[in-house]
Image: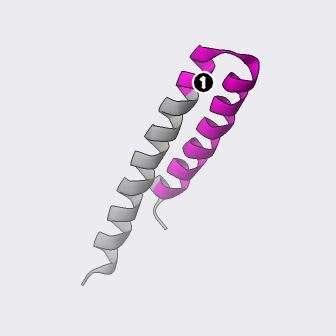
Amino acid sequence: MDRDRTEGSMKTMKGRIKEGLGKALGDSKMEAEGKMDKAEGKVQNTIGGIKDTLRKEP
């Protein structure tokens, strides 16, 4: 598995936690940062998946 996939998954998880805390605390800035982290993590995870696919093809 590509390192980008692992890091992307971690960023997505971090973003979910941050977004949830922002909602719970009423902190819209933290919530927005969490959403951005989630989006960034999903993109990075996708890039890692593409790299994995390219490596597997002969």
In the figure, is residue 37 to the left or right of 48?
right
Task: Give the colour scheme of this rendering.
Answer: one colour
Q: Is residue 21 above or below residue 12?
A: above
Q: Nearer the viewer, residue 46 or 23?
A: 23
The stretch in magenta equals: 5-33
Percent x, y for residue 19?
63, 30
x 62%, y 20%: residue = 30
- Locate the C terminus by quadrant: bottom left
Q: Residues within 10 Å of mark 1 (few under 14, many from 20)?
A: many
Q: Residue furthest right?
A: 25
Q: Is residue 15 above or below residue 42?
A: above
x 69%, y 32%: residue = 20
Percent x, y for residue 27?
66, 15
Q: Nearer the viewer, residue 34 or 4?
A: 34
Badge 1 amino acid: Glu
Q: Is residue 12 above or below residue 56?
A: above
Percent x, y for residue 35?
52, 32
In the figure, is residue 21 to the left or right of 36?
right
Q: Is residue 7 magenta?
A: yes
x 56%, y 42%: residue = 11
x 75%, y 25%: residue = 24
Give the tally of numbered discs. Answer: 1
In the figure, is residue 22 to the left or right of 32?
right
Which structural element holds mark 1?
helix
**Mark 1 — residue?**
31
**Is most of the magenta stretch helix, strand or loop?**
helix
Percent x, y for residue 2?
45, 62
Q: Residue furthest bottom?
A: 58
Q: Is residue 34 magenta?
A: no
In the figure, is residue 25 to the left or right of 45?
right
